Amino acid sequence: MKILLVEDDRRAGEYLAKGLTELGHSVEQAFDGESGLAAAATGAHDILILDRMLPQLDGLEVVRRLRTTGSTLPILILSALDEVDERIQGLRAGGDDYLVKPYHLAELVARLDALARRRADLGPVAKLTVFDLELDTRARKVTRAGRKIDLTTREFQLLEFLMRHTGQVVTRSMILEGVWDYHFDPKTNVIDVHISRLRQAIDKGHERQLLHTVRGAGYTLTEDP
Amino acid sequence: MVAILSGVYLATARLLASESDQLITLEAQSLKADFHDHDPDTFISAIADRAEDPWVRGAVYELRGPRGDFLAGNVVILPDLVVQHDGWVEFQVALTHGDETAARQIRAQIFDLGDGFKLLVGHDIQDRQAFRAVMLQSIGWAVGAALLFGLFAGWWLGRRIARAARGISNNAAHITEGTLSERLPLTGSGDEIDGLVSRFNELLTRIESLTSTMRTVLDSTAHDLRGHLNRIRGAAQAAQHIASEPAMRAACDTVLLEIDRLGTTLQGLLRIALAQSGTAPLEEVDLSRLVAEIVEFYQPAAESHALTISIQPHLTVRGHRQLLTQALANLLDNAIKYAPTAPITVQLIGTDSKAIVTVADGGPGIPVEQRQLATQRFGRLPGSSGLPGSGLGLSLVAAVARLHHADLDMSDAMPGLKITLSIPLIATQAINAKR
């Protein structure tokens, strides 16, 4: 992935760029809003990581200007401000995702991955399929190997979220935000309980397990063992 | 005013009385002189003339001889009075004037002329009394009218002040619940109420600038601390990546874990500060739905608890969705954590003006004397050190309650802890309910 990283905190930017390069991505860096916007406008990148508060041109302003040029470049906003109200502003301005510092590299990578792939299969898909698991969003129906599976509304939403990110790692906070629109850290392992319930529903009695735990990161729904 | 009018009345009445008394006295004195200057027969006929003079209206005379015999006059009320009295008398007598005969009130003086002769000289004071009555009546009307006017003016003024005060109070409530940038409208009359309003507006300006300063401090502190943590985390992660020795890797793990804890604590503190700063934007929130969703979210984690849920639908409050959710999440977290396997009850009911959320658990509860401590920052209770938590959970709940002008109450669920959050309902809801 060709990543444009606009971050005025050079130390933090350096660590992040290094981490991403080691994961096989190519990273171009900019250190202020003006040059960041100019670099993004070239259209040479797959994704933009943008700090919320930048010298010269504020991060939100970069997003706004970029969007007015018609750019659909996926944007992940990094912020040291509390996400409660700021994230709404960031997303409203045209950002695609919002991550608060300090972040785990794994969390950031998972979100980048999700953003980059979302571009590939844009548009509402009526039917999602992973191996022999099928989910029909319009009929609100789930089948595994042709057999109907009964799910609650929330379980259905959770499964749909996982299936839309099939083959990717989704973190607990991504699930919390994507399925419940919650932005706090539940101190109990409640997400894990929701996942294990869903796993019971879709994987129990089947030879091939589809819902996997990724240690230290989150979960993934994939047909690859 | 009543006192002034009474004064006027008394003065006028006295003036009238003394004037007619003076006239009588003067006439009596001149008659006395006449009696001495003339022989009795001439005097008697002079009195008779006077008494019958049709031009003299309202004057009465009566002359009695030494043996009490009637000699002249136009009234006969003596001898008793004349014989016994000396000085002023008042009596009623029928007087004929022209064709009319009417009972009149007379005030008269009786005096000795000498040689046993007694003379009564009097004056009709009926007119004077009528005047007095008219005056009394006029004063009565004046006092009544003044009283009525005063009452009306008082009522009107009171209403005007009450209305102005109510306006100020409503607007002030609106502002404190909403955006601090709003100001109370001035009427432009320049009166005391306008003065009060502009003082109030000055206060609002000060509060607004203070809260915006606080928000700026909050944001820059958050930005600064998070920036540092982020750099430390980046460095620790980079170190972990290249660490070859197991001890070094373990040290890096510890550093990363502690940074994450610090990040969580910082976030908790910042959210409390955000809620307390009052700058968090509020919107219309369907509390019934919010409570139902957060309970549903926690339900799988509460499988070992008997969970009783009762939620009254369609209760709307002005609130901060994320902060309210987190406050409720903290309450449920606590219930699950502190009361393992004990039953949990979640209830939402609406009263006339409040939505009342209750979370009760059957756990050990919090002793009365420690309840205050529980809502303080880092106020961890004795015996809770083995359990995970930053000690910020209930203080966030308390801060969120304040942000929502809600009452937070802790009581005994017998056994266990019962936390009640009473949040004001949106006013339009009451209107809708009335329709």
Image (spheres, coloured by chain):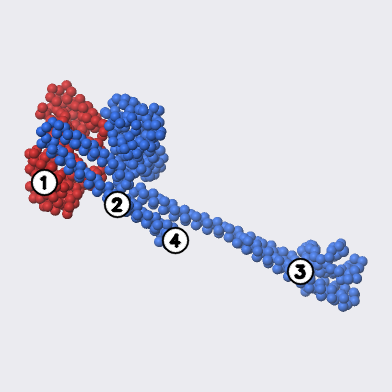
Chain colours: A red, B blue
- Residue type pointed to by label 4: Asp
Quadrant hosting residue B420 = top left
Judge if badges 2 and 3 mark residues of a common chain: yes
Residue B179 visible, this orientation: yes
Q: Is label 2 or label 4 in front?
A: 2
Residue that mark 1 sits on:
A4
Q: Is label 1 or label 2 in front?
A: 2
Residue that mark 3 sits on:
B21
- Residue type pointed to by label 2: Thr
Vertical placement of residue A188 versus B51, above or below: above
Residue A149 visible, this orientation: no
Q: Are marks 2 and 3 in contact (CB under 8 Å)?
A: no
- Residue type pointed to by label 3: Asp
Precedes in sequence: disc 2 or disc 3 = 3
Judge if badges 3 and 4 mark residues of a common chain: yes
Residue that mark 4 sits on:
B191
Judge if badges 1 and 2 mark residues of a common chain: no
Q: Which mark is residue B213?
A: 2
Subunit that carries the residue with mark 3? B
Label 3, secondary structure: give it: helix
Q: CA distance from mark 2 to mark 4?
A: 33 Å
User: Residue B2: image x %, image y %?
Assistant: 62, 60
